[in-house]
Image (cartoon, helix red, strand yellow):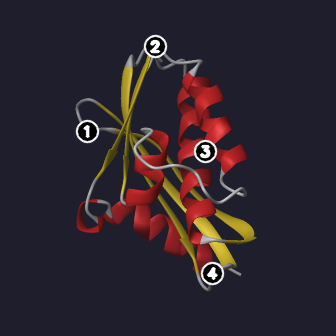
Amino acid sequence: MSVKKVIIFTDGAARGNPGPAAIGVVIQDEAGNTLARISRRLAATTNNQAEYRAIIAGLEKAVSLGVGTVVIKSDSELVVNQINGKYKIKNTALRPLYQKVVQLAGSLESLTVSYIPRNRNSEADALANKALDRH
């Protein structure tokens, strides 16, 4: 596969905070073709940790595909602003997850992380909820 740029839609969900959690990830090429979907249940965790884990899963997949340019779209304003350096990371449990994102970004030519409203992230949200509903 010789895709140079992907758009990754990510969502993390936790029922309870912390509680049962899951991630949903949709990876698309520039034309909007879906290259991969990830729907995975996590151990009990917080919503923000799940949001980070969704981004990490998307980045790991992009790196494994040999992609150079990644655009992440997330509906987590907190996580997007932390990754972009606009918010400090006050919760110590989020710091290693942030560091993993930085490490994975080092394997790419370019990483852009942007906030999108929840209603524009419905497929990733559905994948996260589907994983949560599986027992």
Label 1 vs label 2, nearer the camera: 2
Question: Residue placed farthest to the bottom in the image?
Answer: 16
Q: In this view, does 77 lie above or below 9?
A: below
Does dot 3 land on a helix, a strand or a loop? helix
What residue is rendered at 32% in x and 60% in y? 121
Mark before the other along the chain sequence, 1 or 3? 1
Q: Position of residue 75 (x, y in %)?
A: 36, 60
Which of the numbered marks, if any, corresponds to residue 81?
A: none
Taking the image as shown, residue 35 lies to the left or right of residue 42, namely left
Mark before the other along the chain sequence, 1 or 4? 4
Q: How far apart are marks 4 and 2 (CA)?
A: 35 Å
Which of the numbered marks, if any, corresponds to residue 109?
A: 2
Q: How far apart are marks 1 and 3 (CA)?
A: 19 Å
Task: Tell me whether circle 1 and circle 3 mark residues in contact (CB < 8 Å).
Answer: no
Taking the image as shown, residue 45 lies to the left or right of residue 71, namely right
Residue 77 image-quadrant placement: bottom left
Identify the image quadrant of the C terminus. Answer: bottom right
Q: Where is residue 47 in the image (x, y as percent from the top left)?
A: 57, 70
